[in-house]
Image (spheres, rainbow, N blue to C red):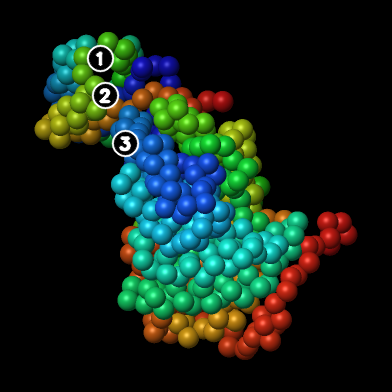
Amino acid sequence: MTLYNNNIFETIRMIEKEKLDIRTITMGISLLDTMDSSGDKARTRVYDKIMRLARDLVKTGNDIENEFGIPIINKRIAVTPIAIIGAASDDKNFLAFAHTLDKAAKEVGVNFIGGYSALVQKDFTDSDRLFINSIPQALYETERVCSSVNIGSTKSGINMDAVKMMGKVIKDTAYLTRDNDSIGCAKLVVFANAVDDNPFMAGAFHGIGEGEAVINVGVSGPGVVKCALEKVKGEPLNIVAETIKKTAFKITRVGELVGLEVSKRLNVPFGILDLSLAPTPEIGDSVARILEEIGLEACGTHGTTAALALLNDAVKKGGIMASSSVGGLSGAFIPVSEDEGMIAAVTNGALTFDKLEAMTSVCSVGLDMIAIPGDTSESTISAIIADEAAIGVINNKTTAVRVIPVYGKGVGETASFGGLLGYAPIMPVNPYSSEAFINRGGRIPAPIHSFKN
Amino acid sequence: MKAIITVIGKDRVGIIYNVSQILADNNVNVEDISQTIMQDYFTMMMLVDLSKLKCDFNTLKDILEKKGDEIGLSIRIQREEIFKTMHTI
């Protein structure tokens, strides 16, 4: 046999028992050439271009899933930020752009389309403001459109006027989608240091430095890492790191294989592979349980930040060795509602909002899928965003906020979003006001890049 | 194109016969085969060449899976690259 039997069974076990999967194939599509002074014309071109490039995306994904025997969970599309595309049009009818994206997504059969986005890390244009104000209605009226706004970066600081606006946008979105536990907020990410090639929703968009079209792949596999760690119980942490690294290597290799194959069949260049341990609400697919396997009684107790730092770093190291195209946000995601272990940790009081914030300083992304009381004020939400952005901007990493102020619900209740988005116990936030701070507006200047301590 | 077929389940008479009959019918050449019995469980792996395959990949996969259901075994076929890429640099 050209391959060792053990390797074959290891691969099969990883897929069948430990839930190794390709989490998403995301096609990035540049819409820069669809801009037009006539809004209608631009939207027709947007629709036509998506249809032309992504027509076979879902079918190709399914074919490859069959041939390689590895599940490919999601097929998605990310486009150039619509705040840029729509800015050229006379009608500035951003909502109509959202409907165009939604229609195209339904037509090609992808479950999400990202890029209803704006990049305002330093300041706004007039049309950026119009765009941002359109987000709540767009998320309410469409089904598959995902939105993101970049409000800060290490190079330009934090746009606190945008931070203030986003507090209101999140509250308005929560209100408009109040019949479904404010689910609109689950499709809205506020970034600092957003990356151009992130394949994961809801924050994916096709950066303006990207090419015509690109295939980015997101691989996952918290279950595989957890199972690998079960075999090194009680060993020193360097052995833990080594085990995670080796596992990440294997997962990444599969992702690269799939990415290259999709790219070949669709004749679209392969961009990056994002190896992120992205949990799902299913048992055996949890990042929190990995941290507990490392030796914590419950995720959120003292030591959690250190264990997560080790995990995140080891995942990146294994990934970098396995592929030259690692990018995006590679690391570990900690979305509360999408992780069975996190949900349990919040429910039994082990994991608090403040601890989550600390954890985000060492993991990829940030405060993700956290349900908070519906009566949380706009300024408190803005302040949460500002804190998270500060962590990203100062530490030169991507951070994001995806919180859901669940309309009409409070601490002790649970919000349910369904499917991969999961469910979440509502977490308390600090009751003291940050209003005067947020109302100042302006900009937090870019940080110094020396004297790092 | 090469693929790996894995068969796992309770041992019984005629497993290899059942699988190889389907392969022969569809013009698939078996290049290598290995089997063991672990705790009553029959496990078999075949490296096959699909370059002269008469039907398409999905049809062959369906036929094999159906046969597996019929005789109470799990029969999988996956392209060889996934195993190679994962375990070799």
Q: Position of residue A384 (x, y in %)?
A: 61, 74
Q: Who is closer to the viewer here, A308 or A418?
A: A418
Residue B32 versus residue A384 in the image, above or below: above
Q: Quadrant of residue A32?
A: top right
Q: Nearer the viewer, residue A434 or A8?
A: A434
Are discs 3 and 1 both within one chain?
Answer: no
Q: Which residue is at the front of the view, A186 or A150? A: A150
The three-letter code of the residue at mark 1 reads Leu
Chain identifier of the residue bearing label 3 in the image: A
Q: Is there one chain holding both mark 1 and mark 2?
A: yes
Residue depicted at x 23% and y 34%: B74
- CA distance separating discs 1 and 2: 8 Å
Given contact means CB atoms under 8 Å apart, are the residues at marks 3 and 2 in contact?
A: no
Is residue A210 shown above or below A234? above
Q: Residue furthest bottom?
A: A432
The secondary element bearing badge 3 is classed as helix
**Residue A116 at x, y percent in the picture:** 49, 57
Of the residues shown, which amino acid type is indicated by label 2?
Phe
Residue tagged 3: A59
In front: label 3 or label 1: 3
Query: Which quarter of the figure has residue B62?
Result: top left
Instruction: Report the chain holding disc 2.
Output: B
Q: Position of residue A374 (x, y in %)?
A: 45, 82
Residue B53 is left or right of residue A299, and the answer is left
User: Are both tags, 3 and 2, on one chain?
Assistant: no
- Residue A436 seen anywhere in this rendered image of the structure: yes
Q: Residue at x 31, y 47 (%)?
A: A107
Question: Which residue is pictured at 27% across the width and 10% down the height?
Answer: B52
* Disc 1 packing (10 Å; few <14; some 14–19; many ≥20): some
The residue indicated by pointer 1 is B53
Task: Using the numbered discs, state the Cα–Cα distance from disc 3 to disc 2 in whole angstroms.
Answer: 15 Å
